[in-house]
Image: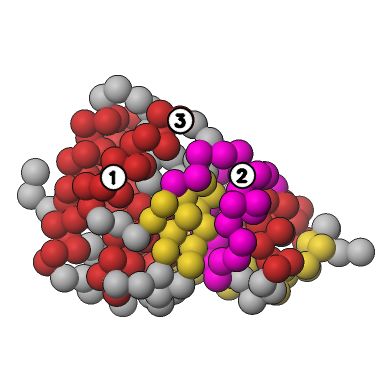
Amino acid sequence: MKSQPLQIDGLRVSRETNEKLSAFADLFRKWAKAINLVAPSTAGDLWSRHISDSAQLFALNPHPVTWVDLGSGGGFPGIITGILLSELGDGWVHLVESNNKKASFLRNAILQTGARASVHAVRIEEAPQDIPECAAISARALADLSVLFNYASPWVERSPSTRLYLHKGRDYAREIEHAHSTWSFDLIRHQSQIEAESVILEISNLTPRL
C-alpha cells in the first residue's frame, strides 16, 4: 500500500523515512490479523489514528535522546519514535512490552524498518533494572496518570530532568486533579493535531508529595 506522508506541524521527514513507516504499516496489518495489536475499531485508520498520532511526540522532542516507551503494544508511539530517530542516526527507544506475542511483533518491526529501538519483554515495574537512565518517557492508552507516575519514578529519581510525554483522552483533567494529590509536577498541555478531544501531556519536575 502506498505510503502517506506525515501530516504533523513542525515535522518533515525524508522519503526514506516515509518508506520505513510504510513498511511498518504493511507489517502491522499482517500481524494484526493474528494478534490484537490495537482496538479493531481503529485499525482501519492506521496512518492518521496511530502512526501520525504517535509521531506527534517526536515532533515535541525531535532530538537524539534516549526514550523509554511503556506498554509499547503495537508499536505506538515507540516504534514510530524509533523510525524517526533513525533519520537522525542517533538516540534510542527502549520498548517495554511484557506480552511475548507483541514483543515478537516489535522485534520484527525493528528488523524490517531499522528503527533505533530494542525490546524489553518484562513487566514495567522490572524495566528500571534493565534500563539505567532515559531523557524521555512515553505512553499511550496505558494507565491513569498516577499509575504512570509510579512507573516513571525510578527513572526520574535517577535523572530529574527526565520528561514524560503522555497521550490522554477527554478525561485528562480529572486525571491531572487526582495526580496532584500525591505528586508535584510541571505540566504543558499540547492539543492533539489528530483527535480534537485528545492532548499530549508534557510532564517535568515530577516529585512525590511528602
In the rendered image, the residue lying farthest to the right is 210
Indicate left or right for 61 with 4 as reference.
Answer: right
Q: Position of residue 43 (x, y in %)?
A: 29, 36
Magenta residues (range): 119-148
Q: Residue at x 86, y 64 (%)?
A: 209
Q: Position of residue 124 (x, y in %)?
A: 61, 44
Disc 3 element: helix
Near-viewer residue (192 or 164) = 164
Mark 1 sits on what residue?
109
Where 168 falls versus 56 (above or below)? above
Mark 2 sits on what residue?
124
Amino acid type, label 1? Ala
**Of callouts 1 and 3, which one flags the residue occurring earlier in the amino acid sequence?**
3
Image quarter hosting the N terminus: top left
Amino acid type, label 3? Asn
Real-space CA distance between mark 1 and mark 2, rounded to the nearest whole angstrom: 21 Å
Near-viewer residue (186 or 124) = 124
Near-viewer residue (74 or 201) = 74
Q: Position of residue 45 (x, y in %)?
A: 26, 42
How packed is label 1: few (under 14 Cα within 10 Å), some, or many (20 or more)? many
How packed is label 2: few (under 14 Cα within 10 Å), some, or many (20 or more)? some
Determine the image quadrant of residue 164.
bottom right
Mark 3 sits on what residue?
100
